Image (tube, rainbow, N blue to C red):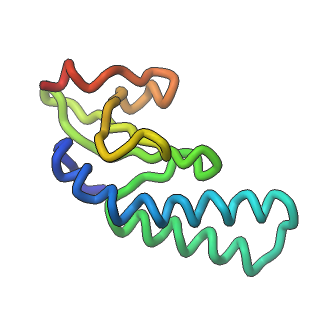
Amino acid sequence: MPRFTRATAEAVLPQAEPLLEDLQRRVAAYRRNASDPVAREIRALIVELDGLGVEVKDPGLGLIDFRAMRDGREICLCWKLGDGPRILYWHDLDAGFAGRRAIDPLN
């Protein structure tokens, strides 16, 4: 996975957001009526997002991470659908969504 700064991750959001919205819709459709074609579409969207350097954490919530560095250690910049055009949170690799913290300490 590539490493991002807040600015480079935010630059990817305009490409990632519509893909993530599509992924969220397809996951919901798959949950209502599982089918191989929809499963393939889901996998293809995840591969496309992965190609942007995005780690899909929860397609149902529209939750994604971007790998970054903080104080010499790898962290995740955390974003989900509805957060808007800025990345507002980060967390340690092992903390996950529950460990999200405001991005201000990164500045």
Q: Residue at x 87, y 66 (%)?
A: 33
Instruction: Give the x, y percent position of residue 72.
Output: 13, 29
Q: Residue at x 25, y 50 (%)?
A: 10
* Image height of 41 relative to 88, above or below: below
Who is closer to the viewer here, 96 or 83? 83
Who is closer to the viewer here, 23 or 75? 23
Quadrant that contains the C terminus: top left
Q: Residue at x 66, y 77 (%)?
A: 40
The mark tally for this picture is 0
* Image height of 70 relative to 62, above or below: above
Q: Residue at x 48, y 66 (%)?
A: 19
Instruction: Give the x, y percent position of residue 30.
Output: 78, 64
Quadrant that contains the N terminus: bottom left
Instruction: Give the x, y percent position of residue 12.
Output: 28, 59
Using residue 57 as the reference point, say whether residue 16 is left or right of it. left
Residue 99 found in image quarter:
top left
Residue farthest to the bottom? 37
* Image height of 93 relative to 46, above or below: above
Residue 100 found in image quarter:
top left
Instruction: Give the x, y percent position of residue 85.
Output: 32, 46
Using residue 75 as the reference point, say whether residue 84 is left or right of it. right
